[in-house]
């Protein structure tokens, strides 16, 4: 059975973009393959760090609910 560590070690594509001032500034990150798995940060590095934490929470929730993880 695939566990949390299995999924955390997969190399999911991360998309990152700079947010406009109207959007609050900083950087936005998402993992398109995991719907709703998004985060942000003041710097690109912070956004990447935060999206990895969001990925962990996303996968943990799916595993707890018995939902499939892509």
Image (cartoon, helix red, strand yellow):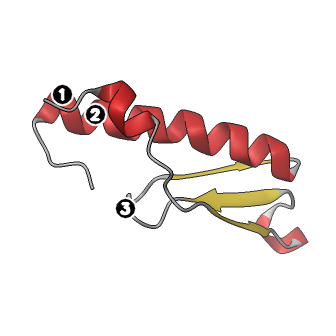
Q: Quadrant of residue 16?
A: bottom right
Marks 2/1: CA–CA distance: 5 Å
Query: Dot 2, crowdedness within 10 Å: few (<14), some or many (≥20)?
Result: few
Q: Is residue 7 left or right of residue 9?
A: left
| Residue in view at x 38 percent, y 57 percent | 34
Q: Secondary structure at mark 2?
A: helix
| Residue in view at x 52 percent, y 39 percent | 54
User: Taking 8 as reference, is 17 above or below it?
Assistant: below
Q: Which residue in the structure is indicated by mark 1? A: 64
Q: Are the residues at dot 3 and dot 2 in contact (C-beta closer than 8 Å)?
A: no
Q: Quadrant of residue 14?
A: bottom right
- Look at the image and tell me in which quarter the C terminus lies: bottom left
Q: Is residue 65 left or right of residue 70?
A: left
Give how far across and how far down residue 50 sits, in percent.
Answer: 66, 39
Mark sitting on residue 61: 2
Marks 3/2: CA–CA distance: 13 Å
Q: Which residue in the structure is indicated by mark 3? A: 35
Q: Secondary structure at mark 3?
A: loop
Q: Is residue 40 left or right of residue 39?
A: right
Give how far across and how far down residue 36 sits, in percent.
Answer: 42, 58
User: Taking 19 as reference, is 36 above or below it?
Assistant: above
């Amino acid at each position: 059975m695939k566990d949390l560590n299995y999924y955390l070690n997969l190399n999911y594509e991360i998309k990152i973009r700079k947010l406009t001032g109207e959007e609050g500034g900083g950087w936005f990150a998402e993992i398109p393959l995991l719907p709703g798995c998004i985060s942000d940060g003041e710097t690109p590095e912070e956004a990447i760090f935060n999206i990895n934490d969001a990925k962990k929470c996303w996968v943990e929730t799916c595993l707890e609910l018995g939902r499939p993880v892509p």
